[in-house]
Amino acid sequence: MTDTRTPDFLEVDSLLAPDERQVRDTVARFVDAQVLPVIADCFETGRFPMELVAPMADLGLFGPTLSDYGCAGLNHIAYGLIMQELERGDSGVRSFASVQSSLVMYPIHRWGSAQQKEHWLPRLAGGQAIGCFGLTEPDGGSDAGTMKTRAHLRGSDWVLNGAKMWITNGTVADVAVVWAQTDEGIRGFLVEKGTPGYTTRDIPHKFSLRASVTSELFFDECVLPAASRLPGAHGLACPLSCLTEARYGIAWGAIGAASACYREALEFARQRKLFGSTLAAKQMTQVRLAEMLRRIVSAQLLALQLGRLKDAGRVHHTQVSLAKWNNVRAALDVARDARDLLGAGGITVELATIRHLLNLESVITYEGTETIHQLIVGREITGEEAF
């Protein structure tokens, strides 16, 4: 019950299938061996560890729930465990895999043409191409339906104008899945790097997700061939369903971040001596560690049930909202309390907790803020719109 990676106080491990545990353990070893040794320096210097993309692809971590185009065909529990272990390393690493899988490969696989799928999905799965997802705008934020980016037909081509902001992977992406208003409603487009009129810029001076690329996208009379449009994507429900896929992974990823903070605080409390005994022997320390564990175990059980519903085809997007809200809030609370228990050392990048704490301030905001998810659940249980 004091697992050095993710706590298993209620024997959740026994509820996993052997192949699910194997996936988790494989990714956990990768995180221990290749992510943790470099991630503190990456965070401090503001660099995404691009050298991890190839080994992540070799492990089948991109688009793992897809069963074709070179993908692994795993279930959603296994996918969640992948996200959990990657975020135990760092939210930026999990975000990269989440965007690549849920926000880029998923919409191409679901709404793309045969040619789009054949061209992009094997390359994205193999890490030879990187994708990003262009939905959020400078003036839009949570209200995606007010997007100002617009595409109009000029002959057989589409002409795209507008801007997107807070885009993970933007400046390193080979292809952007971009959502725009048209005369027929919101549509999705694939915009390749190097297309005239398409430019990107990194967002500097971040104090969160520093080991992640965060960018702005600009479209100025960007001409796209007709074949660039996702033919099956019609309406705002399409990008929102992509967000539901990503939010599911975040609900699991938060468990990894919380577990890393809990582990660090527990180890410190066992070693630190104050007033004649270890910090772990103090009543308030035990209460605080027990509260951390309670939050983690609750998040584990919620995520597991959500994954079973998703694999059974019965999950509702409001259930995903509840899990994203609950689990990220739990992780943020754990990280904050762990940071306090660690004392002055808790503010240094030599320990993982401050890094996770700062990252989680972004995670609780992106893919729908905490308030948005509260209102989504509130609308579901009352039948009243309160946005």
Image (spheres, rainbow, N blue to C red):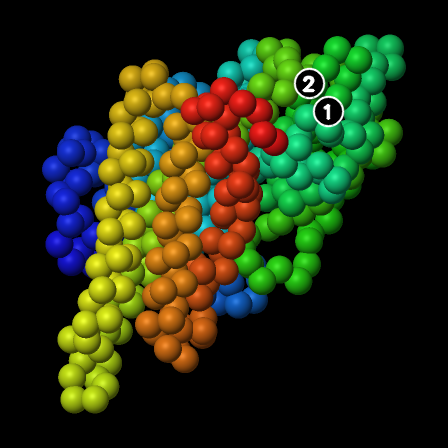
Between 333 and 35, the one nearer to me in the picture: 333
Q: Quadrant of residue 239?
A: top right
Please state which amino acid type lies under the numbered disc 1. Ala
Tell me the amino acid under the disc marked 2: Arg
Q: Position of residue 265 (x, y in %)?
A: 29, 68
Q: Image check: 328 left or right of 128?
A: left
Question: The residue tagged with tag 2: helix, strand or loop?
Answer: strand
Task: Please report the residue visible at 22 percent of the width from the left and 59 percent of the height from the top.
Answer: 290
- What residue is drawn where x is 79% and y is 13%? 183
Going 39% across and 42% down the picture, which residue do you hit? Answer: 326
- Callouts 1 and 2 close, C-beta under 8 Å: yes
Residue beneath the point at 82% across and 30% down:
161
| Image position of 248 with respect to 359: above or below | above
The residue to which callout 1 is attached is 180
Q: Is residue 140 visible?
A: yes
**Which quadrant is the N terminus positioned in?**
bottom left
Reading the image, the residue beneath label 2 is: 187
Drawn side of residue 60 relative to residue 204, left or right = left
Q: Position of residue 191 (x, y in %)?
A: 70, 29
Q: How many marks?
A: 2
The vertical placement of 304 against 385, above or below, is: below
Q: Quadrant of the C terminus?
A: top right
Crowding near the residue tagged with mark 2, few <14, some 14–19, many ≥20 C-alpha atoms within 10 Å: many
Q: Residues within 10 Å of mark 1 (few under 14, many from 20)?
A: many
**Residue 135, image x and y in percent?**
65, 32
Secondary structure under badge 1? Answer: strand
Using residue 287 as the reference point, say whether residue 167 is left or right of it.
right
Residue 77 picture quarter: top left
